Image: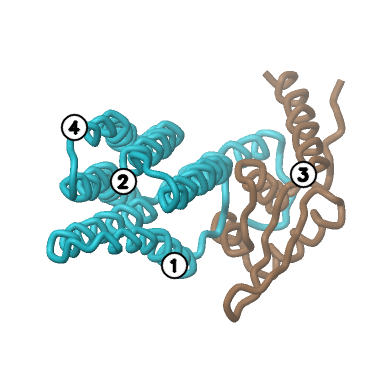
Chain colours: A brown, B cyan
Amino acid sequence: MFKELNPLLHSELRLGIMSILISVEEADFVFIRERTMATAGNVSVQIEKLSEAGYIEVKKGIEGKRTRTVCKITEKGVNAFEEYVEALKSYLDVSR
Amino acid sequence: MEEKTLTEKESLELISQMILNTKQKLRSGSGKPFLIWGYTTFMVSLLIYYLINKTEDYHYHWLWFLIPIIGFVGNYLSRKKRQKHSKNYIDRVISYVWIVIGISGFLISFATIFVRMPALSMEVLLMGIGTTLTGLILKFKPIIISGFFAIASCYIFFFIKGSEEIIIFGFIFLIMMVIPGHILNYQQRRRHV
C-alpha cells in the first residue's frame, strides 16, 4: 500500500532546504541559498512556507550592518521528514 | 533548484546529495583558535621569562592574565571577520569542551594568587585534555598526538625549578597548539581548492 507523500515536502526546493537543515544544527540564509543554488526570492518564499507549517524555526537578527536569517529544523519538521522518507520507501520497494 | 514536483527516485537522490554536500562543505575544526591561543601563550611566556630573568621581579607573573585577554579578543575578532554560515553538532560539542576547560583553567590561575600550587603543570594537563578531546571529536591525528604529548609533558614540571619552567610551558603550547593548528589549516585549504 502506498503512503501519501507530504505535498509540502514533495517539491525540489523545499525538500532541498529540509535536507540541509536535517544535517546541521542551524544554517543561515546565505548558506541555504548557496547550497540549493536557487534565487534569493525563491528561497525566501519556501522558507516562509516551511516556517508557517512549523517545520522550521526562523530567527532574524542583525549582525554588523546586515540582517541575518538563521533557520533551524523543529521536532515537527524532523518527524515530517522521517515520515516523508518512509513514504518514499514504500513507493521504491514496489517499483523494484 | 526550483519549485517543482519530483519523482520518488529524484526525491531520494536529492536528499542524499544535499546531505552529503552539506557534510563536505562544513568548515568544522578550523585551526584558527588553536593558532590564536597557541601563539598568544607562547609569546606571553617568552615575555614573562625575559622580564623575570632581567629584573627578578616576580610581579611580572601578573602578565599571565594577558593570555585570556588577548585570546578572547583575538578569537572574537577572528569570528567576526569570518562569519560562519552554519553550525553543526561537532561545533557545539567542541565549544562546550573549551568552555569547561577555559573556566577550569581560569580558576586554577585565579587560585594561584592565594595558594602555592604547580599551576603551570596543571594548566598544561588541562589544556592537553581539551586538545586531545578536540582531536578525537574532529578525528584529526596531529591534534590527538599533540594533546597526548602535552598531557604526558605535565610531569616535566616536577623536575624543573625556577624560571626555566616558564619557557618550557611556552614551548609545550607551541607544539600542542601551533603546529597542529597550521597542519589543520593547510589540510583544509587543500581540501577546498
The kind of residue on which mark 1 rests is Val
Quarter holding residue A79: top right
Q: What percent of the width, then of the height, locates residue B49? A: 19, 57
- Left or right: where does residue B71 sit relative to residue A43? left
Query: Do residues under tags 2 and 3 come within 8 Å of each other at their CB atoms?
Result: no
Residues packed near mark 2 inside 10 Å, few (<14), some (14 to 19) or many (20 plus)? many
**Do discs 4 and 1 belong to a common subunit?**
yes
Residue placed at 38% from the left, 65% from the top?
Answer: B70
Using the rendered view, name the quadrant where residue A39 is placed.
bottom right
Report the amino acid beneath label 4: Phe
Describe residue A90's horizontal placement relative to residue B100 as left or right.
right
Label 1 – label 2 distance at C-alpha: 22 Å
Q: In the rendering, which numbered label is found on residue B159? A: 4
Q: Secondary structure at mark 1?
A: helix
Q: Residue at left 74%, top 49%?
A: A11
Q: Position of residue A84 (x, y in %)?
A: 78, 35
